[in-house]
Each structure stands twice: as C-alpha cells, then as structure tokens.
Amino acid sequence: MGRESDRDSIIGRCEAQGLRMTEQRRTIADILGDSADHPDVEELHRRAASRDANISLATVYRTVKLFEEHGILERHDFRDGRARYEDADRDHHDHLIDVTSGEVIEFVDAEIEALQRRVAERLGYELIGHRLELYGRRRAKRSS
C-alpha cells in the first residue's frame, strides 16, 4: 500500500486547517501516519525521539492535544490507564482488546454494523456514528 497523498495525510490535513507545522510537529505527524498500532504519548515520544532527540515529551503531549482538538486524531481509552491515538480519518473499524496482553485488534463486521443501524432505527434514530470496543481474553485451547 502506498503513502497517502499530501492532501489526505495528517500533515496535509493540519495544513488545510491552518495549523503551523514545525519540523517537530511534522515528525510526530509522520510517525502517527505510519503507525499501524494505537500508540500512547509515551510511545509516540520514544519513536519521535529516535528521529529527533530534541523532541520533548511535553512537545508530544501538546501536539497530540492540538491534533485531537482539530479532529486529526481520535483518542481511545482501552481501560489500560493510557490514552491511545489513531488517525481520525481512517476507514471505520471496531476494536477487540485482549485484556491479558493489551493487544488491540481492529475488525469490521457487516452483521454488527447492520444490527447497530437496526437498533437505532427501532428506537427512532438515524445512526450517524458509533464506537465499539470489545474486551476479551483468548480461550484456552481444548486438548483432543
């Protein structure tokens, strides 16, 4: 899969909203755009500092807050005491969180999507969005 176009990238969306994009903000935006996981601020700082040792933890906190306030990032609380982030412009998906390992598994299920729409309609609403987080642990394999 190729990189996003500039217009669709996190940097491009920040610039389109008139945000001043310093080199440090660009580095953080690039890391977020390249992330396949849901990093917290400390993990973002670790990744950013490996590219630019001058990026402070405070800078990462401020940048993430700014991006979240402008709808660039979506914040998640997966009940592990850490706010995690992902690009708010990604295709819709839900999350299954392994409570043992902390792994976050993204999935899309047409049946769940249809059920949510039907529930909203039955209650007299048009569904305009939702967030679904499932929590579980792997079942022990049964011996044969």
Image (cartoon, grey):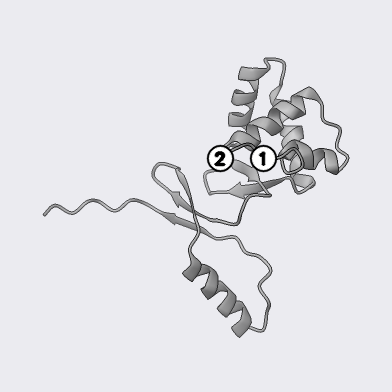
Q: Is mark 2 on a helix, strand or loop?
A: loop
Residue appearing at x 56%, y 41% in the figure: 38
Residue at mark 1: 4
Give the camera-side residue of 54 and 112. Answer: 112
Q: Is mark 1 on a helix, strand or loop?
A: loop
Q: Is residue 71 above or below residue 28?
A: below
Percent from the top left, x then y, of residue 24?
75, 24
Image quadrant holding the N terminus, namely top right
Q: What residue type is labelled 1?
A: Glu
How crowded pointer 1 is (Cα within 10 Å; few <14, some 14-19, many 20+) is rated as few
Q: Which amino acid does label 2 sit on?
A: Met
From the viewer's perspective, tell me whether residue 108 is left or right of residue 27: left
Q: In 3D space, how far apart are the residues under numbered discs 2 and 1 (Cα atoms)? A: 9 Å
Percent from the top left, x then y, of residue 115?
52, 74
Find out whether the residues at labels 2 and 1 contact each other: C-beta distance under 8 Å.
no
Percent from the top left, x then y, of residue 16?
84, 42
Determine the image quadrant of residue 87.
top right
- Farthest residue to the left: give it: 144
Percent from the top left, x then y, of residue 89?
68, 49
From the viewer's perspective, tell me whether residue 88 is left or right of residue 7: left
Residue at mark 2: 1
